[in-house]
Amino acid sequence: MALVLLFVFCWFIGLANATFNVTTLSFDEGYSPLFGHGNLVRSPDGHSVRLLLDVYTGSGFISSSMYRHGFFSAKIKLPSDYTAGIVVAFYTSNGDVFEKSHDELDIEFLGNIEGKPWRFQTNLYGNGSTNRGREERYSLWFDPSKEFHRYSILWTPNNIIFYVDEVPIREVVRNDKMGGDYPSKPMSLYATIWDASSWATNGGKHKVNYEYAPFTSEFKDLVLEGCPTDPNPIRTLSNSSTCTDTDAWLETRDYAVITPKSRSAMRRFRQHYMYYSYCYDTVRYPVTPPECVIDPNEKQRFQDSGRLRFGGSHRKQMRNARRKRRSRPTSNISTEQNDM
């Protein structure tokens, strides 16, 4: 077994050493603070940013534009030591514009007690379908708090791919039977850190311990590639054809092509590191969702699924986080441009 895991680890290391051909942006070129401004710390050169969570507030940033399809990526380093109850999220959403019919694509890192590894999940919503979460949960072949790793979301009219470094870990192919559950409206890119004590670690058994605060997540080498659109929802939907050329360009990019080698790596990742998939959760979904492709081996592995707890859409989570935020003295930490 140890030799098998070593082989799998080396396989991923070899594939992850490849790099996508992307152009990175400085913070001011593509992003704006979202909340917890005093806990958002930009580097002197503006190409990296720290997000902090303390007893007063978490923090986050948002892309300056909305995008109709695109590739969203960042190198991220997570907090270390005791991180129970913490969620660091890298996701797309349009909940602030389409309040009752929003779309969302999530990568959420779920903290853990000291000595236990970080876990994370991917998810998607379309057209306000928040009662139909499509979560998958995984562990990693490395410690994400020790060094930076790239996490990415590709969203096209035809498919969605989630990446860790250059390893694809999940692909959702658009299916007509999904209808509006497939994200279709322009979205912004978000990055946040916040207190999710009610569900993130062992279903809420372990809470955030602020004796370890501040908790710091770091982001650098930020990437936004796609079609920026008008934030007005009526004009945006009426001008959807303007992104046709960009959509075609996205399909030609190296991150849009899953080669036989990378598809094999995706299968290996899912075999060794995925520990939950909604497709096999018969408690939540007695009828299998239409986009699921059932693998008999995976089905046997996940036959006891259905006992995990989930936090739901970021739109509701962010609203609750802001409502619970305590008042605090004004801080100028975000303008001091501290070293990172």
Image: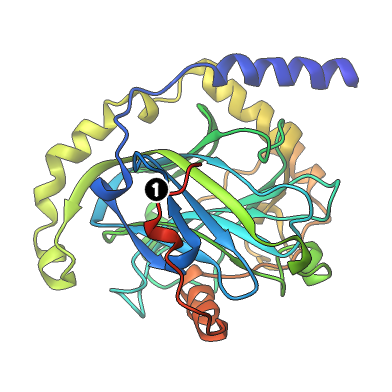
Identify the residue at horizontal 54%, vertical 24% (top origin): 263
Identify the residue at horizontal 60%, vertical 64% (top origin): 53
Residue 75 as seen in the image, left or right of residue 188: right
**Closer-to-camera residue (233/192):** 192
**Regarding mark 1 in the picture, which secondary structure is present there?**
loop
The answer to whether residue 288 shows anywhere in this view is no
**Closer-to-camera residue (137/176):** 137
The quarter of the displayed image where residue 43 is located: top left
**Closer-to-camera residue (74/265):** 74
Residue 225 as seen in the image, left or right of residue 182: left
Q: In this picture, is 48 found above or below 67?
A: above
Task: Give the percent coordinates (x, y) of residue 149.
Answer: 56, 33
- The crowding category of the residue bearing disc 1, from other C-alpha atoms within 10 Å (few below 14, some 14 to 19, many at least 20), is some
Q: Which residue has dot 1 on it?
A: 174
Residue 85 as seen in the image, left or right of residue 116: left
Q: In this picture, is 11 found above or below 158?
A: above
Q: In this picture, is 232 found above or below 11?
A: below
Task: Give the percent coordinates (x, y) of residue 292.
Answer: 56, 49
Total marks in image = 1
The answer to whether residue 203 shows anywhere in this view is yes
Dot 1 amino acid type: Arg
Task: Give the percent coordinates (x, y) of residue 240.
Answer: 14, 56
